[in-house]
Image: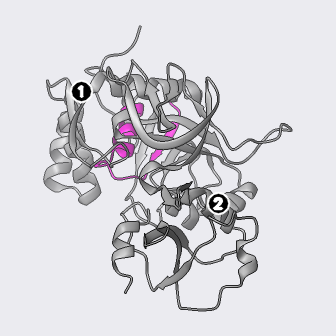
């Protein structure tokens, strides 16, 4: 029988203490009135979760269009939590770490997983440098890539880490090959109530690893006429979700992410995916960079390369492996990229700073 959102698992603990619904209401009130900033966010979420409404108001990230406020079914969030718990074989009393802001969908879902699955959840300030207790062992944690990158020496006692909110860089993928936790990149958005697919990044078996996302049980995927991913997941959304993510579907349960349709460049009638070019260039460029476009009288749009850092000469052999229409026509240098709180590069804002 599927648990309902108005129940709290009898093994649930927050920071070492078990609470029922009434106890959690008191915790929420205390956090809101007297807590640190991150605890206030936890308290506000708990207060919303424990009220009589069947939906929760959340802010979308813009993955399927312009960012907006939407209502999400609490029961859909429960289904998402249970699906993740089943996939990663989480058990009651497993210890989990909350190090993401509770104001985000990722932070909210960590709390819901703990409430529904009976996890023993520890919350710590969601900072870049995390205050992880070195004496504790954790079965599960969720982080943004920047947190994982800056806390590699502190995560040895975490069994499984899911990473999302921003792309995982090629450098980080290389580094995590030598760490103990198994790391998964997630694919999802607010509309899908966190992730609907995961991709293992390290600790592979003898099988050759493939760069594909594996959809979670109950998720059906297809493509529209733009080659963008279409998601049918009745347990988490009554409506079909049409994304702006161009994908290549391998089979009914796996897909390869190619890039954003709103990033696609039409250069001389040829469609160019910036993320595909970036994946090739990561082997040759040490600095952070991204591919974008500018208007061009002849081509319509011309491909450009934007690099973070001081100006220097870029050798042409860097572009080996690119098709002629993928090779940047101009290279620009920017002192610092504009970023979101999760470390995702804000391309449009950064482009606007180019003189």
Magenta residues, as a range?
92-113
Q: Position of residue 231 (x, y in %)?
A: 45, 28
Q: Nearer the viewer, mark 1 or mark 2?
A: 2
Residue tagged 2:
279
**Residue 103 part of the magenta-drawn span:** yes
Q: How many numbered marks, from 0 up?
A: 2
Where residue 280 is drawn, which disc sits there?
Answer: none
Q: Is residue 262 visible from the viewing direction of this image? A: yes
In three-dimensional space, the C-alpha distance between marks 1 and 2, rounded to whole angstroms, equals 47 Å
Q: Residue at x 39, y 58 (%)?
A: 126
**Residue 63 part of the magenta-drawn span:** no
- The quadrant of the image that shows the N terminus is top left
Residue tagged 1:
21
Q: Position of residue 122 (x, y in %)?
A: 42, 46
Image position of 131 (left or right of 320): left
Q: Earlier in the sequence, mark 1 or mark 2?
A: 1
Element assignment for label 1: helix
- The quadrant of the image that shows the C terminus is bottom left
Element assignment for label 2: helix
Q: Position of residue 89 (x, y in %)?
A: 59, 27
Q: Position of residue 327 (x, y in %)?
A: 63, 70
């Amino acid at each position: 029988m599927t648990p309902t959102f108005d129940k709290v698992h009898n093994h649930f603990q927050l920071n070492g203490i078990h609470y029922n619904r009434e106890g959690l209401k008191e915790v929420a009130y205390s956090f809101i009135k007297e807590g640190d900033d991150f605890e206030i966010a936890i308290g506000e979420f708990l207060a919303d979760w424990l009220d009589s409404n069947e939906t929760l108001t959340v802010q979308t990230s813009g993955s399927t269009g312009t960012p907006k406020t939407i209502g999400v079914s609490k029961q859909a969030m429960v289904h998402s939590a249970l699906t993740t718990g089943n996939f990663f074989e989480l058990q009651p009393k497993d210890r989990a770490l909350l190090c993401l802001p509770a104001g985000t969908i990722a932070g909210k879902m960590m709390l819901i997983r703990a409430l529904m699955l009976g996890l023993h959840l520890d919350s710590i300030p969601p900072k870049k440098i995390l205050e992880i207790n070195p004496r504790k062992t954790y079965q599960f944690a969720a982080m943004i890539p920047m947190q994982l990158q800056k806390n590699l020496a502190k995560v040895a006692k975490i069994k499984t880490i899911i990473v999302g909110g921003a792309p995982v860089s090629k450098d980080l993928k290389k580094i995590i090959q030598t760490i103990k936790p198994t790391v998964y990149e997630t694919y999802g958005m607010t509309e899908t109530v966190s992730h609907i697919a995961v991709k293992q990044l390290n600790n592979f078996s003898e099988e050759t690893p493939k760069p594909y996302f594996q959809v979670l049980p109950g998720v059906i995927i297809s493509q529209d006429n733009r080659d963008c991913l279409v998601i049918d997941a009745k347990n988490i959304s009554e409506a079909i979700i049409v994304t702006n993510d161009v994908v290549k579907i391998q089979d009914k349960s796996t897909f390869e992410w190619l890039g954003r349709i709103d990033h696609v460049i039409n250069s001389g009638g040829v469609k160019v995916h910036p993320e595909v070019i970036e994946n090739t260039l990561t082997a040759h460029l040490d600095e952070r960079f991204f591919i974008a476009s500018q208007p061009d009288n002849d081509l319509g749009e011309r491909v450009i390369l934007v690099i973070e850092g001081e100006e220097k000469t870029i050798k042409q052999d860097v572009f080996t492996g690119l098709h002629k229409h993928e090779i940047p026509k101009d290279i620009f240098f920017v002192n610092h990229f504009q970023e979101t709180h999760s470390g995702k590069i804000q391309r449009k804002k950064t482009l606007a700073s180019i003189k």
